[in-house]
Image (cartoon, helix red, strand yellow):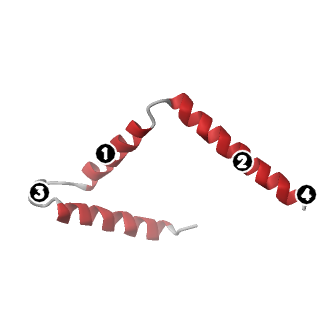
Amino acid sequence: MASPHGVVMVATQFILLKKLLHKQELPFLSAFDVREIIMHTYANKKDDIKEALQIMKNRHRQRANMHNNQIKT
């Protein structure tokens, strides 16, 4: 598992990169703006909550099967 400080450093680097890349057209781009864009983009990929829940249930089922197979061996 990544340390929280490492994750924060990567996130900060990502935000700085976005600010530098878009300095001309978005001079006031903030970390909050980047966060909102990411959240909006992610939310739009999950149009249907039922589909998202089904995908999650399938992943959980696969993990349970893998876990059960490991116990049997």
According to the picture, the residue beneath numbered tag 1 turns out to be 36
Q: Residues within 10 Å of mark 2 (few under 14, many from 20)?
A: few
Discs 1, 3 touching: Cβ within 8 Å:
no
According to the picture, the residue beneath numbered tag 4 turns out to be 72
Q: Earlier in the sequence, mark 1 or mark 3?
A: 3
Q: Quadrant of residue 22?
A: bottom left
User: Residue 55 vs residue 36: left or right?
Assistant: right
According to the picture, the residue beneath numbered tag 2 turns out to be 62
The answer to whether 61 is drawn above or below residue 34 in the figure is above
Residue 53 drawn at (x, y percent): 59, 34
- Describe the element under mark 3 as helix, strand or loop: loop
Looking at the rendering, in which quadrant would you find the C terminus? bottom right
Q: Earlier in the sequence, mark 1 or mark 4?
A: 1
Depth order, front residue of 17/31: 17
Identify which amino acid the numbered label 1 is placed on: Glu
Q: Residue at x 31, y 45 (%)?
A: 36
Q: Residue furthest right?
A: 72
Q: Earlier in the sequence, mark 4 or mark 2?
A: 2
Between tags 1 and 2, which lies in front? 2
Between tags 4 and 3, which lies in front? 4
